[in-house]
Structure formats: structure tokens, C-alpha cells
Amino acid sequence: MVTGISPATTETNEWTHCHDRAHQDRNPLGKRVLSPSWIPYRGLQLSSHAVPDHSVKGPTKRFPVATVNNILKDVLTSYLQEEKYEAELCRQMTKTISEVIKARVKDLMIPRYKIIVLIHIGQLNDQSMRIGSRCIWDPANDTFSSYSFKNSSLFAVANVYAVYYE
């Protein structure tokens, strides 16, 4: 279990730091940057419960990654196999496909997982693309499924994130 931050025991208008001093490093370009070990909190400190509590058991039923991968493959193939890329059509298809995938994953009835579905559809030309996602993650309980699809005209990437909550 991860909780937020709690008020500091002493009131101050100054920035408080996790360490006595800010550590400064140089990045590869030679510019000074603050290292991640320096985290300012204005009058707030991390509570003792800000770290994951590993005494809590975790999910009773694990998220079925392989089953969700099959759902992604089935839905993307059935919706996009014969489609040609058209911007407006693909904009609508991302919404439809994400709703269908989310409904099918929820039909698996895996308790206590928040399901997030991201769909990217683009025109298939001689380009490359990089997709990234960030969130607070518990590697012991949280997971994801991903599937990439392409035909002669378009490509699609579907990601399903399963974030366990208590």
C-alpha cells in the first residue's frame, strides 16, 4: 500500500530537502543539473507509509497476460484487417476498439485491477515511431499486455495496463 505525503512536524516557509544539501551532477552535455537524490517539499515530508507495504498479500487472482494478448490480437485483427487508413475513420476506430477491449478484459472478472487501454493507429509509410508510457508502478502486482498489428495501409498498437489497487 502506498500513501501520499503528510504535513511536516515543523512549520516552515523554506524548502525542506530529503538530504542536508542538494547534490549537483553534470550531465553528458556538461550542464549542471540537480540529481534525483534532491527532492524539494514545501513544508511536507514523506510519511512512514510512503513506501510499499509488502506485508499485504497482493492479488488473489493474477492478471492473465496471455489471455489479454489473445483478446488484443483478436480485436485488432477483426476490426482492422481490411481497413484502409483514413484519419477520421481511425480516430473513431481507436475509441471503438479501446471500448471493446476494455469490456472484454472486464468480462474476465479479475478483481481489484484498474484497467487502462491505449490504442494508437497510424498510416503505414516508411516511418518509425516510438511510443512511451509512464506511471507509478508496483512490479510485484502491476502488469501490462501489448500487441502490434499492421496491414498494407495502417499500423496499430494496443496496450492494456493492469494496475492493482487495494
Image (cartoon, rainbow, N blue to C red):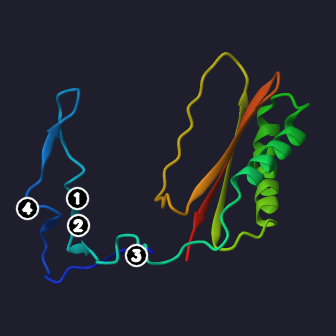
Say which label, 2 or 4, has the lower sequence index: 4
Say which label, 1 or 3, has the lower sequence index: 3
Say which label, 3 or 4, has the lower sequence index: 3
Q: Which residue is mark 4?
A: 20
Placement of 5 over or under 160, stated as above or below = below
Mark 2–mark 3 distance (CA, rounded to whole Å): 16 Å
Mark 3 crowdedness (10 Å alpha carbons): few <14, some 14-19, many ≥20: few
Residue sitting at x 81%, y 51%: 96
Find residue 14 and report its image quarter. bottom left
Position in image of residue 143 (x %, y %): 59, 56
Name the mark on residue 3.
3
- Please state which amino acid type lies under the numbered disc 2: Tyr
Contact flag, marks 2 and 1 (Cβ < 8 Å): yes
- Please state which amino acid type lies under the numbered disc 1: Ile
- The reply, left or right, for residue 67 in relation to residue 31 is right
Say which label, 4 or 1, has the lower sequence index: 4
Mark 2 crowdedness (10 Å alpha carbons): few <14, some 14-19, many ≥20: some
Q: Which residue is mark 2?
A: 41
